[in-house]
Amino acid sequence: MTPRTIAVVSSGLSQPSSTRLLADQLAAAAVRARPAGTQIVTIELRDLAHDIVNNLLTGFPSPALRDAIGQVVRADGLIAVTPLYSGSYNGLFKSFFDVLDPEVLAGQPVLIAATGGTARHSLALEHAIRPLFSYLRALTVPTAVFAATGDWGSTGDAGDALTARIERAGAELAELVDQRQPAAEADPYASATPFDQLLRGS
Amino acid sequence: MQFGIFTVGDVTTDPTTGAAPTEHDRIKSMVAIARKAEEVGLDVFASGEHHNPPFVPSSPTTMLGYIAAQTSRLILSTSTTLITTNDPVKIAEDFAMLQHLAEGRVDLMLGRGNTGPVYPWFGQDIRKGIELAVENYHLLRRLWREDVVDWTGEFRTPLQGFTSVPRPLAGVPPFVWHGSIRSPQIAEQAAFYGDGFFANHIFWPTEHFVRLVGYYRQRFAHYGHGTPEQAIVGLGGQVFMRENSQDAVREFRPYFDNAPVYGHGPSLEEFTEQTPLTVGSPQQVIDKTLAFREQFGDYQRQLFLMDHAGLPLKTVLEQLDLLGGEVVPVLRRELDALRPANVPDGPTHEALVAASLAGAGTELETSTR
């Protein structure tokens, strides 16, 4: 198997964070599903919170944020995990995706997941988070994973259900990552239109 | 090498006093700043063009014509003239008129503008920004270079037998710079015509602009105007100085923290590390500006932003004393000495007239018809 990189983006705000815990378990499941040569890079948005806001205000990323964005954009797949706030992704999660250039996630396989207090909020994955990635033209895997606080202490059916869902989602992501051509970063200079063509177009 | 200042023309409350200049105050300050620029030995004054508050300079050639009458040496320019939403016929007329009044001390920098609503206010579509810049500029060039123009395009009513008056001074149009923050197409446009390319890198990290300028240089050579090193490059800069650098930081911080564009964002320290902003002693400004040459190669024009964010006129004039008295003489000496003999100096009307008389401009002109 070709070595591939999966980026993990977690926007949990507490430390330690159950959002990060879920993110790590999803990453491990993806690695288990494609055992040869999968590299995981994890980006904690909390560490970049000020840089993300500064990017919103100035229009450019700090060196640390630029590195993180580069890792996400160059990755062959993405695991994106957010806590649910007020019925949706948290502001930090959305702000990170807001500062990306248009189109950079187009076609990228993405596994979406969220944490919340109770299972009542689980459909936020379908009405808020999946549409965000549809807008970005990313390729979300069918299984989205929601973990309520109670799931972390469940045994039997509830606990097994979360574990099974994590495994299934990880396998779905691994399959899409395998099928996809290795990502190449767009070069605006290599693809710039020669001027006589620009002129003829006018 | 040419040194000067460029102004956005913002009306901003002084955050340290709460004093808000009127539009009239600001306009008169801009004139005073331009006169001071000549007095302290700078070469260029450039005004932005805006069509919304809190900015005042909606009519740059009116202001530059007035400044032309009060100065004798200063080159009057823009930063930028909106090539997308102005009628190219009016640009041709306004700048030719200004050229005559200023005895040729005129050039201009074209830009697309970054204020979305200006497009619909002037009857255009922002999604056509690049196409407007390409078509309008091509027409502008013809209006200046051909006495009678027949023309049909996508964005403006056709012209039949049209003569733009007055004709450019001595038959030589003003030099044109193209300014862009992120579009390779505009670097391509500047390169195609052998025009100047101005990278206003004051709000963004240097490495991004190094690529953009490098691309322009390479395409300038591709289109046969010379070597990449001979391309005509201008750069922005932003400085605040006091003899003691700690005084500069202390005095400028409230203006920085509340500035339009980047205020309430990164710290002054982060911003000075990541962008060309220098807040410190004149020597620090000299060192940072000399580093521009190492990053971008020998270049022809350096413009500094000195008068925004509510800085009082008195402070700006003091800044210009430092810039003209302590910084620019050193930079001029160092950068002129480092520039190889085959790399052109900053463009002037006299040089363009001389080149035109020598016939050097002929090939360039006909190739772009």
Image (spheres, helix red, strand yellow):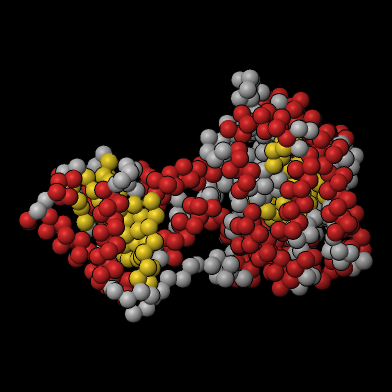
* Residue B247 picture quarter: top right
Q: Residue furthest left?
A: A156
The answer, for residue B126, to whether it is visible in the render is no
- Identity of the residue drawn at 62% across and 46% down: B273
Q: In the picture provided, is A117 more to the left or to the right than B6? A: left
Please tell me whether residue A37 is drawn above or below residue B172 in the rendered image: below
Please tell me whether residue B228 is drawn above or below residue A146 in the rendered image: below
Q: In the picture provided, is B181 more to the left or to the right than B127? A: right
Q: Quadrant of the C terminus of chain B?
A: bottom right
> Between A93 and B9, which is closer to the camera in this rendering?
A93
**Where's residue B306, x and y in %?**
72, 37
**Where's residue B129, x and y in %?**
56, 55
> Between A199 and B182, which is closer to the camera in this rendering?
B182
**Where's residue B39, x and y in %?**
88, 35
- Identity of the residue drawn at 54% across and 40% down: B266
**Where's residue B77, x and y in %?**
77, 45
- Identity of the residue drawn at 70% across and 48% down: B236
> Between B68 and B310, which is closer to the camera in this rendering?
B310
* Residue B280 picture quarter: top right
Q: In the picture provided, is A200 more to the left or to the right than A100? A: right
The answer, for residue B19, to whether it is visible in the render is yes
- Identity of the residue drawn at 73% across and 54% down: B292
* Residue B341 picture quarter: bottom right
Count of marks overlaid on the render = 0
Q: In the picture provided, is B208 more to the left or to the right than B4? A: left
